[in-house]
Amino acid sequence: MARRGLLIILSSPSGAGKSTHTKRLRAWDPSIRFSVSATTRAPREGEVDGVDYHFKAEDEFKRLVADDKMLEHAHVFGNFYGSPMEPVQTAINEGVDVLFDVDWQGAEQIKDSPLGQHVLSVFFLPPSIAELRRRLEGRGQDSAQVIDKRMAQSWDEISHWRSYDYVLVNDDLDATEAQLRTIVEAERQRRDQQPDLAHHVRGLQDEFAKGSDVV
């Protein structure tokens, strides 16, 4: 039976494992498609329209928002960013899962959108605040000032954990990945993700109505 695709939202405070599990999930199932965001900022050297971002003029972006053609959007550092609805709708109808790497605000907008019924949202918690800082420092990517800023923001992000369908404590990467796979496989079988079920049940009803030999 055919199924509809899922909108898989993964969120976490910086350093809690969202990016790692995004990569692992797509390595496990390469058919999962990463959502390509739209933005009004200028392309950087080497970036390709439709691959890295959908680059839009500001007027066009605002028109898409006004016409309810964005699943979520935000204004960040003078530019607009958002997730166009049309390619996601097409993927869902084709039974393809689409992966979103967004914060809690983006997750709420997507869940409130016309495609919200297909959302699967997962939030990753760190095992401790001390471990969260250790991971940020261990990446060697940010200055002490930036790490302090990320740590200050982490509690605001963590405070929205109740709004997610599933919450995983990312203590052991392999164990958490196994849990995430199990969740995705189960959610794919949700009744409302399988449009052919109603047709199958009508067929069973017809058998009863015709006095099937098996009854």
Image (spheres, grey):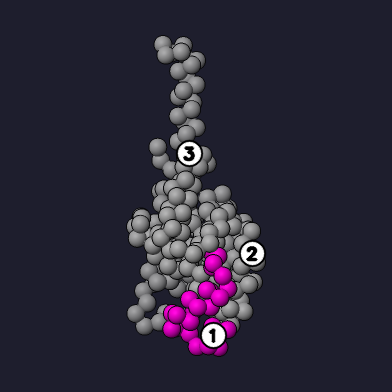
Residue at 44%, 48% in the rendered image: 185
Mark number displayed over residue 195: 3
Asked whether residue 126 is drawn in magenta, I would say: yes
Mark number displayed over residue 2: none
Q: Relative to residue 87, is residue 57 depicted above or below?
A: below
Give me the C-alpha separation between circle 3 and circle 1. 47 Å
Closer to the N terminus: mark 3 or mark 1? 1
x and y percent of residue 60 in the render?
52, 70
Mark 2 residue element: loop
* Disc 2 target residue: 160
Closer to the N terminus: mark 2 or mark 1? 1
Q: Relative to residue 210, is residue 149 depicted above or below?
A: below
Q: Are marks 2 and 3 in contact (CB under 8 Å)?
A: no
Closer to the N terminus: mark 2 or mark 3? 2
* Disc 1 target residue: 146
* Residue 184 seen: no
Q: Relative to residue 103, is residue 208 depicted above or below?
A: above
Asked whether residue 100 is drawn in magenta, I would say: no
x and y percent of residue 200 in the render?
45, 29
Mark 1 residue element: helix
x and y percent of residue 117 in the render?
56, 49
Marks 3, 1: nearer the viewer: 1
Q: Residues within 10 Å of mark 3 (few under 14, many from 20)?
A: few
